[in-house]
Image (tube, helix red, strand yellow):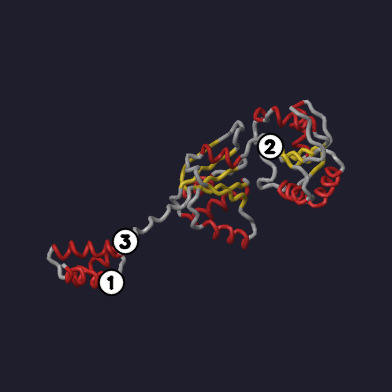
Amino acid sequence: MNPLEKGALYVVGTPIGNLGDFSPRAAETLAQADFIAAEDTRVTQKLLSHLGLHKPLLSYFEHNKLSRGEVILARLREGETCALVSDAGMPAVSDPGETLIAACAAENIPVYVVPGPTAAISALAVSGLPTGRFTFEGFLSMNKRSRREHLAQVEHETRTMIFYEAPHKLRRTLGDLAKLFGDERKIAVVRELTKIHEEVWRTTLAEAAAHYREQEPRGEYVLVIAGAETPALAEEFSLEDGVERARELVEGGSSASEAAKQAAKEMGLKKGEIYRELAGRSGRA
């Protein structure tokens, strides 16, 4: 691997459960970085110990991201290299790393990505639901107003939806989703990805909500939910189509007026326009 660029931020994906998923390039990036900005330094220290590395760690999480972000930016400006990691998965995805990366972009500080596991995409891949188009919704807020607004925005979503959820909020979320989308909407409840107790349960929202009313939720969850069915597009008919249909009805014994009325009803056209055209053609015949 080439040496890291001085004064650059490296966004490093970390395992979402199985440490064997950490890539050689990611390990080399941590080894070369001048320091590591970590969501929880205790979690990252375990990863470093697994890799046999000893690196300076700086905590960077939701409640200190503004003050620590300034510290990190200052060190980057001085030419140091920083590896940004979260506890699990890709930094910046439902993660305060988003703020730091935006700040670097605003100052034209180089940012590079070292890809790694992502719970959302991994869960989508094994969900058994359509993957061609999807939307990542992250966590639903516990604030009633924000939660209500978020749910209202996805009520008619036709793409597959991916939500993250913590165990202590799972019951409420499944109940809210069942009310919003209906009991029979398909869902894949994915938990503890890549860990010993990994589980992918393909079911309906009603069954999932009922199950967890009786069973205590354990582990971290990804909820992959089928989108709403796309309404069938109404077929568009031209006036020519309407007149042709009316002529068929006339040939079958209907009067011109009755034929125009029936054709208009079937095709969503105006009776008067069909009748005038039909009468005009009859006169020219």
Disc 3 is placed on an element classified as: loop
Decide which of tag 1 and tag 2 comes sooner along the chain. 2
Q: Name the residue under label 3.
A: 237
Q: Name the residue under label 2.
A: 13
Q: What residue type is labelled 3?
A: Phe
Residue 42, visible in the rendered structure: yes
- Displayed quadrant of residue 60: top right
Relative height, residue 133 to residue 149 (above, below): above
Q: Name the residue under label 1.
A: 273
Disc 1 is placed on an element classified as: helix
Residue at coordinates 25% horizontally, 69% vertically from top-left?
274
- Nearest to the eye among marks 1 and 2: give it: 1
Per the model, the C-alpha gap separating discs 3 and 1 is 13 Å
Label 3 neighbour load within 10 Å: few <14, some 14-19, many 20+: few
Decide which of tag 3 and tag 1 comes sooner along the chain. 3
Q: Would you say the residues marked 2 and 3 are in contact, meaning their CB atoms lie under 8 Å apart?
A: no
Q: What residue type is labelled 1?
A: Glu
- Nearest to the eye among marks 2 and 3: give it: 3
The percent position of residue 165, horizontal first and vertical second, equals 61, 47
Q: Would you say the residues marked 1 and 2 are in contact, meaning their CB atoms lie under 8 Å apart?
A: no
What is the quadrant of the N terminus in the image? top right
The percent position of residue 127, horizontal first and vertical second, equals 50, 40
Residue at coordinates 23% horizontally, 62% vertically from top-left?
244
Decide which of tag 2 and tag 3 comes sooner along the chain. 2
